[in-house]
Amino acid sequence: MQKINYQVNEKGYYGEFGGAWIPEMMFANIDELRRRYLEIIQLPEFIKELDQLFQDYVGRPSPLYYASRLSEYYGTSIFLKREDLNHTGSHKLNNTVGQILLAQRLGKTRIIAETGAGQHGVATATVCALKGMKCVVYMGALDVQRQAPNVKKMKMLGAEVVSVQSGNKTLKDATNEAMRDWIKNPEDTHYIIGSVVGPHPFPDMVARFQSVISREIKAQLLGKTGSEFPTRIIACVGGGSNAAGAFYHYLNHNQVELIGVEAGGKGVDTKDTAATLLVGSPGVLHASRTMLMQNRDGQITEPYSISAGLDYPGIGPLHSHLHKTKRAKYIATTDEEVLKAALLLTRKEGIIPALESAHALAALEKLKLNENDVNVINLSGSGNKDMETYLNAFNF
Ligand SMILES: *Cc1c(COP(=O)(O)O)cnc(C)c1O
C-alpha cells in the first residue's frame, strides 16, 4: 500500500485541500507568516517559553482520566483527556498562547481575532492581557447578543469587541471583517485564527500548537496501560483544532482508529445541521480549499447546532484530507443525543462537559465497543458556559 502523507506540503496542501486562496492585498501578511513560522516555533528559546506557559499558565499536562463508571456502563475502557481543566475551560488556549508568542517574535503589537461563540475571543483576549497587547475581536452582531457573558469577559480582559452588522451577522461575517482589518494593518497586527482553518500556514500552525494534546496522551497512556496506542481516539469537530491536536501524533499509526464527530444538529437529513463532511462538497472558504456547506449556486449555507462552537460551515483542510483518504472516520451526533450524553457523563463521573465535547461522548452509542478496547475521548471543554442550555433542556 502506498504511504499517504498527512502533513502539509510546501504549498500548504493536504492532498487536494488547503492552500492560501488569498486576495493579492493579503499577500504581504501571509507571506511573512509562511516564511517565518516554522523557524520561530522551533527555536529552543520559543519552545522553552511555550512549555513554561503550558505548565504554569494553562495548567498542563491536562490529566488523562480513566472514567471507571462510564467504562463499566459501556463495557469497555474509556479515558477522558481533560482539556476542560485548562485555564479558560477548553483546548483553545493552547493555540492562542502559541500564537501570541509568535506574534511577539514577529514584532507585532496589536492582535485581531474573529469569534462566533466567543470562546476563541476570550482565549485571545486572555493572552493579550498576559502579554500587554492591544486586542480587537470581531463578532457578528447576532452573536454579540447571544453570547453576552463572553462579550463581558472580553471587555473585562481589555479587548475591544467590534459588532459586525454585515451579512447574517454571524461568524462568517466577523471573519471577513477581521481579514479586512488585517489587510489594512499588515505592519503591526497579527491575526489569531482560532482553529485549523483559513489560509496556509494557519491550519498547520494551529495543529502544531494543539498537538501537545496527543503528545501528552501518548506518554500518559503508556504509563497507565503499558502502550502508547489506544484502540481509538474520539474528538468533536467544528473547525477541527481539538481533533487535530488529539489525532496529530497518531496520524501515521494506522492501527489507531481516529473518529471525528460533527454536529448533526436536528439530523444530517435536515437543513439544521453543521455536519460539513457528511453533507458538504469542496469549495473555497476563508482562503482555503476544503469541504463546506453550500447550495447549488455555491452560496454558503448557514449551519445550525445546539453548540455554538461547532456551527461553522467549513472544516479544516486536514480533516477534508483525512476524510477523503479514509484515515479518519467522521460521524455526526444530533442535539438530542448530545444532551443525553452530557447528562450521562455528569451522572456517572461528576463532570459536566461542554456541549461540543458531548458530541464526542454521544458517539459511544454509535460505535461497536469491545471489552478490551481502549477508547480515548478528547474532552475539549467544560460545561460551565452551557448551563443555560442544559437547564432549559432538562428543566431542573
Ligand atoms: C471551539 C470549541 C470546539 C470546536 O473547535 P475545534 O476547532 O473543532 O476544536 C470544541 N470544543 C470546545 C469546548 C470549544 O470551545
Image (cartoon, rainbow, N blue to C red):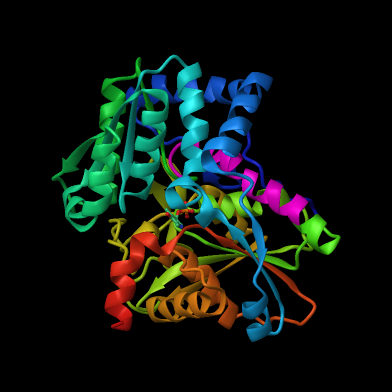
Q: Which residues are magenta?
A: 197-220
Say whether residue 139 is magenta. Answer: no
Residue that protrudes farthest toward the right in the picture: 226
**Horizontal relation, residue 394 to residue 252: left or right:** left
Q: Report the image quarter containing ligand 1.
A: bottom left
Name above or below for residue 256 compared with residue 219: below
**Horizontal relation, residue 202 to residue 368: left or right:** left
- Residue 224 x %, y %: 79, 61
Say whether residue 211 is magenta. Answer: yes
**Horizontal relation, residue 172 to residue 377: left or right:** left
Report the residue at 34% width, 74% height from top.
Answer: 390
Name above or below for residue 230 compared with residue 369: above
- Residue 41 x %, y %: 60, 26
In the image, 223 versus 238, the foreground residue is 223
Name above or below for residue 105 compared with residue 376: above
- Residue 28 x %, y %: 40, 19
In the image, 295 versus 139, the foreground residue is 139
Instruction: Tell me the chief SS of the magenta region.
Output: helix
Report the residue at 67% width, 47% height from top.
Answer: 6
Report the residue at 65% width, 54% height from top.
Answer: 247
Residue that protrudes farthest toward the left in the picture: 165
